[in-house]
Amino acid sequence: MIEVRNLSKRFGEVEVLKHIDLDVKQGEIVAIIGPSGTGKSTLLRCLNFLETPSGGEIQIGDVRVSANNVSKREIHQLRKQSSFVFQSYALFANKTALENVAESLITVWKEPRVQALTTARRLLVSVGMEAHLDKYPAQLSGGQQQRVGIARAMACKGEVILFDEPTSALDPEWVDEVLAVMKQLAAQKQTMIVVTHEMQFAREIADKVIFMEGGVIVEQGPPSQIFGNPQNARTKAFVARAA
């Protein structure tokens, strides 16, 4: 359902991603782990052109684009195939939780406002936010804001939800409530790619774990392999330190 070939990204002379190949099946939960500064978040942002890749091809669903020859229309079509959950929430400060979730339905999908608000309410209820529909981001805890962010991503109707370290900005007491929502999505077989430092989440929930270091995929496989019997010495060292 997702196919990435030879994806690269440079910032000036620095090659952050080095010819990445990646395949994700429908309904698969993929966790990307590795040291900070190794290209994990850049890979995620390149998948929907929040960062423009320097080279390679990306296919999500039935939309395929080449980084070296892509139009604005193709980028727009690719972005509609995925939704993004940011580590810093990225909610509109001047909109309520309900309005934040409904916004993409109204502006991108051109749904009537009443219909969009009805869908937004249903999604917020599904992530346990029914008591906070009319609150603004400043009135919500970090965990509550991130749950609004997840509901907003669910509203985008994409084939895949991309999570960029969704718990890294949270105080410890809020981490579990966000992970619980993600586990709920995983149980529904929502296709997800998650950049995370939560090793227990990756071990328990992911179908496939990818270890990245130095801008390359060093090793990938089921959690039982990556955490229990890593084949690469660099993977083994990282897992031992992270345990």
Image (cartoon, rainbow, N blue to C red):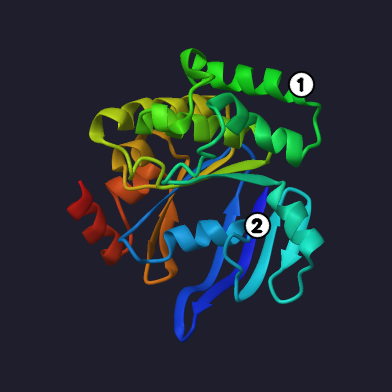
Q: Is residue 154 above or below residue 58?
A: above
Name the one closer to the observer, 69 or 112: 112
Question: Closer to us: mark 2 or mark 1?
Answer: 1
Image coordinates of residue 229 in percent, x first then y, are 29, 50
Image coordinates of residue 181 in percent, x first then y, are 45, 26
Name the one closer to the observer, 84 or 58: 84
Residue shown at 61% from the left, 29% from the top: 99
Secondary-structure class at tag 1: helix
Q: Is residue 32 above or below residue 128?
A: below
Among all residues in the image, which is located at the extreme bottom?
13
Residue shown at 42% from the left, 46% from the top: 87
Residue shown at 60% from the left, 58% from the top: 47
Residue 204: mark in rendering: none
Count of numbered circles on the image? 2
Instruction: State how far apart marks 2 and 1 are (Cα).
Output: 33 Å
Name the one closer to the observer, 115 or 158: 115
**Does residue 11 appear left or right of residue 7 in this picture?**
left
Crowdedness near tag 2: few (<14), some (14–19) or many (≥20) residues, C-alpha within 10 Å: some
Q: In this view, does 17 lie above or below 241?
A: below
Q: Please state which amino acid type lies under the numbered disc 1.
A: Gln
Image coordinates of residue 189 in percent, x first then y, are 58, 30
Do the residues bearing badges 2 and 1 touch, measured as CB atoms within 8 Å? no
Quarter of the image where one finds residue 94: top right
In terms of sequence position, does the residue under pointer 2 or pointer 1 come before the other? 2
Q: Please state which amino acid type lies under the numbered disc 2.
A: Glu
Query: What residue would you read off at disc 1?
Result: 115
Query: What residue would you read off at disc 2?
Result: 3
Quarter of the image where one finds residue 7: bottom right
Image coordinates of residue 155 in percent, x first then y, are 65, 32
Secondary-structure class at tag 2: strand
